[in-house]
Image (tube, rainbow, N blue to C red):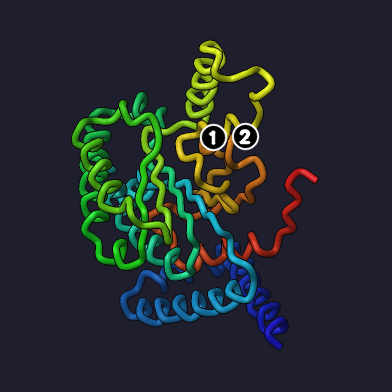
Amino acid sequence: MRSRRRVLGKSLDLFAKWLLKFRLISIPARKIADSSFAWSVISRSDRVRANRLKDRILLSELPKHVSIIMDGNRRFAWSKSSPVGLGHSEGKEKLKEVMDWVLDLGIPYFTVYALSTENITEREDDELDVLYDLYVLGLHEISEDSRIHDRGVRVQVVGRLGMLPKRVRDAISHAEEVTSQYSDFTFTVCLAYGGREEIIDAVKSVAVDHASGNLGIDSIDSSEINNRMYASELPDPDLVIRTSGEERISNFLLWQIAYSELHFSDVFWPSFSKSDLYEAIESYQQRRRRYGG
């Protein structure tokens, strides 16, 4: 019976998404959705749909480690003719929501891509200052958030942190220190991060140890490299989600995601919903993981 309900529910979801591809349906639907009269009805419908999706995904094994490339803050702001800073601020608030949803599901490892090394070298200084201020604020909020402490969430930030301003590094140190005793959940933020850079740093570490005679050439294998990753204690991600419709990895966890399942969502990160998360997890559950076999 549960299997039949699950198939029927998914069929209805797919049919609704198919209908929305047609302008004859999608344009009136958007106008209705934007009306204050219909908003409460639509919101309730979305909650019902999210609850139905949650019931379905809880029938199968959940991923242990979910990673998200949080993309689309700037385009979200541009779509609303708002300052870019507003998009980043909305993105910060969305992360707090998604953290709640992940904790509610009991997924023990959650990793997000917040700022790349390329972002630091290519973005305007004004935009970077806005981002840095948001990181400081967000890390202080995490440090004081009762949900973090009640659920035993350890917070860690990885990347080439020396590229970040001192105020951001101080906020990182504080958040890591006040949550260091927890082990039920691990929340990892990738800041000033690049997957290639992480591998380069690991290889340099191996080269130094080999040159000093502390590491024999035959001892250099995938495990030795893995042990020198920024967060080597983390299991590899089971599921990687990218928002905003882009279908690429963008230098994220290149070593760790060799066998991860990938899911690409069309919505900008600030618009990412509980249903979007559950859809990604359901998509993951329906795949057969082969690990290269």
10 up-or-down from 214: above or below: below
Residue ID at (58%, 43%): 247
State the residue in front, 127 or 240.
240
Secondary structure found at label 1: loop
**Image quarter of residue 160:** top left
Q: Amino acid at mark 2?
A: Ser
Residue 152 located left or right of residue 16: left
Q: Dot 2 surroundings within 10 Å: few (below 14), some, or many (20 or more)? A: few
**Image quarter of residue 125:** top left
Q: CA distance from mark 1 to mark 2?
A: 6 Å
- In the rendered image, residue 185, in percent from the top left (x then y), is placed at 42, 59
Residue found farthest to the right: 293
Quadrant containing the N terminus in the rendered view = bottom right
**Mark identifier at residue 227:** 1
Residue ID at (42%, 65%): 103
The answer to whether residue 128 of the structure is visible from this angle is yes
Q: Amino acid at mark 1?
A: Asn
Residue 190 located left or right of residue 67: left
| Residue highlighted by disc 2 | 223
Residue 40 located left or right of residue 51: left
225 up-or-down from 190: above or below: above
**Image quarter of residue 149:** bottom left
Q: Badges 1 and 2: C-beta atoms under 8 Å apart?
A: yes
Q: Dot 1 surroundings within 10 Å: few (below 14), some, or many (20 or more)? A: few
- In the rendered image, residue 154, in percent from the top left (x then y), is placed at 36, 54
Residue found farthest to the bottom: 1
Residue found farthest to the top: 211
The answer to whether residue 82 of the structure is visible from this angle is no
Residue 53 located left or right of residue 140: right
**Mark identifier at residue 101:** none
Residue ID at (58%, 20%): 215
